[in-house]
Image (cartoon, rainbow, N blue to C red):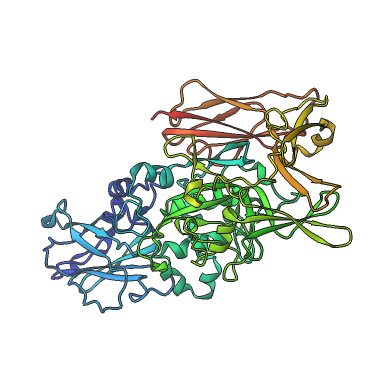
Amino acid sequence: MSKHLATVGEKTAFNRKKCGTEFSGQPIKCLVALEVALLASNNSAHRTIEITTKQLVVRRGQSFLITLEMVKPFRTHDPLTLIVETGPAPSEKRGTRSEFGNPSPMYTSDVKAIWKYNIDQSANLQRGIVTLSVTPPVDAPVGRYSLFAETLSDRTTLGTLVVLFNPWCSDDSVYLPDERERQEYVMNEHGLIYRGTSRYFRPMSWEFGQFEEEMVDICLKMLDVNPKYAKDPADDVSARCNPIYVSRVVSAMINSNGDRGVLVGRWTGDYSGGERPTHWIGSVSILQRWYQNNCNPVKYGQCWVFAAVMCTVMRFLGIPCRVVTNFQSAHDTNNSLTIDENYNDNGATESKDSVWNFHVWTEGWMKRPDLKKGNSYDGWQVLDPTPQELSDGVYCCGPASVNGILQGEALLKYDMPFVFAEVNADIVKWMVTARGLKKKMHSDTKTVGQNISTKAVGSNMRNDITDSYKHREGKDCILRSIYLLFKHLFNKSLQNLQTEKKKKSIHVPLLTSSCSTDVILPIRIPFSVYNKFMANCDSMKVSAVAIDKQQEDDIYETETDIALEDPSISIKVLGEARVFQTLTLEVEFKNPLNEKLWNCSLTVIGCGLFKSDYVERLRVITMPYKAGMKTVVADFDCSAFRDVKGSCTFEIKP
């Protein structure tokens, strides 16, 4: 027998070899496993056919069919027991083993995750064809199971199957009622990730690829190499029934800090020995490299890469998940719920805390019975795999209830104070003189946590979910507050890609007790100053400090993030696109500079289109292996521009 459930051809040979007349008098002796036709229909019914057609992948709380062939006619009261086991130490008390069938076992009160079966109406008992409808319980641990069958005198190995969470089942703790949302947050392999600044944000296409063939082995391997499994494998496998536990494990395993996780984070300009974080356009190649390299981490990632890879794993496991971007995101290092920024006389800043122009995390959908507040904090939960601060000694974050954050419940687990500060912290700005004296300039209660964004359901529009995290600020004004200093500093945020200088004006209000006067200050930022940084940066931060020399306590400060706009890439499909037929794509990039571009390369990926990253300089040719609406994502790299992105969505016909 193979390690997977046997095919029809296998079962016939098996019966002839094993089921001779020497078993005469035994009404049931030899059993065989799932037919190929049933495997396809089961995976289709469980919405896992996109993952694989080679092994059985089912969702808990939903029945699937297996067919057993007996040597003699079968009667409904004949003894037939099925056994499922997962993990290295299967136990009924831990929910990692279940024995069920006829006769029905006498379960003790401490037995967990009880499976069941019924004889399906499609069975032909007179011919010994027994079709069983088997149902994994809604509290079954996710993972790979071995399946056995027993009669009075024999035990037969039927093969293996994989069990996932089930957001379609109302009793599952990840149940998501809306079908459109299930299609978006579980089934969609393509997504958008928002980056940039709070005033100029732009989407980047990303291929999650949770249904590519390798994902079964990769995602289950990730669970099996996590430190909690190494410490107590029986306890870890048992806990995989709980999406709260699983999501914390995945959050920790996406980064490589302290474990055998997937990605190394780096925020400096030196990315030698790996890929720049901006290079990636999909999760599959990252996960493949990690898995094929004996679980050694892949270099390098930053927040949006960590979040996107986690979204892939969560969607594969069946936990609804989405990628969320928080603009002006605070990083509070000491749980003070404030970001303290110190400025010297020259306007330079020093601070252990920080505010990022954007930060990206994931949200997972699940119930939170551990918070003991009824269903008040069920639903979306923040999960952040970017290694920032320790959580119970591990570099992970969440799940933190989004509704709990909205209600200000900063003491709830997990990591609520940290996440609350990311969207709500006040920025307190101090002037530190040369003599070391510290003067408070002002507190900013509005800057942190803006335009919190995720991809809209069923479209490529942006969904602003800021109101899910925080209540709107009041409209009362502060007399001496300074207005936005750099409003539209450059047309479309430093879009100048030529060598001549650009001159723009900035309005600074000077307030008095009776009136205000605008003073226009010209500022020139030559292309020659920032062009050498364009290859590795997509934004810059500008700050200004104004001190009233007549009244030194009168200090004003403001800052802005300026995004650098990339040139565009166009992708066209040449001819008709069909499964298993050659497909040609035309990718076009126009050089906006009056200089040659060196070291040019083009990387193209697409779920159901390319088995791995496709790198080509002139043209892109592939052969699609999955039908339906598919998206191609391209990354263009050269001496002057780093990782310019483009995408195209089209239909692959059967």
**Residue visible at 72% across and 42% down in the picture:** 513
Asked whether, in this view, residue 53 is left or right of residue 132, the answer is: right
Instruction: Quadrant for residue 481, please give it.
Output: top right
The percent position of residue 553, horizontal first and vertical second, equals 80, 53
In-front residue for pair 358/216: 358
Residue 301 position (above or below residue 110): above
Asked whether, in this view, residue 596 is left or right of residue 91, the answer is: right
Asked whether, in this view, residue 74 is left or right of residue 512, the answer is: left
In-front residue for pair 119/607: 607
The percent position of residue 647, horizontal first and vertical second, equals 56, 31
Q: Quadrant of the N terminus?
A: bottom left
**Residue visible at 36% across and 41% down in the picture:** 180
The percent position of residue 454, horizontal first and vertical second, equals 51, 43
Residue 426 position (above or below residue 105): above
Q: Residue furthest front?
A: 514
In-front residue for pair 619/236: 236
Q: How many marks?
A: 0
Instruction: Quadrant for residue 499, please give it.
Output: top right
The percent position of residue 344, horizontal first and vertical second, equals 83, 54
Q: Quadrant of the C terminus?
A: top left
- The answer, for residue 1, to whether it is visible in the render is no
Q: Residue furthest right?
A: 435
- The answer, for residue 505, to whether it is visible in the render is yes
Residue 26 position (above or below residue 218): below
Q: Residue furthest top?
A: 575
In-front residue for pair 432/323: 432
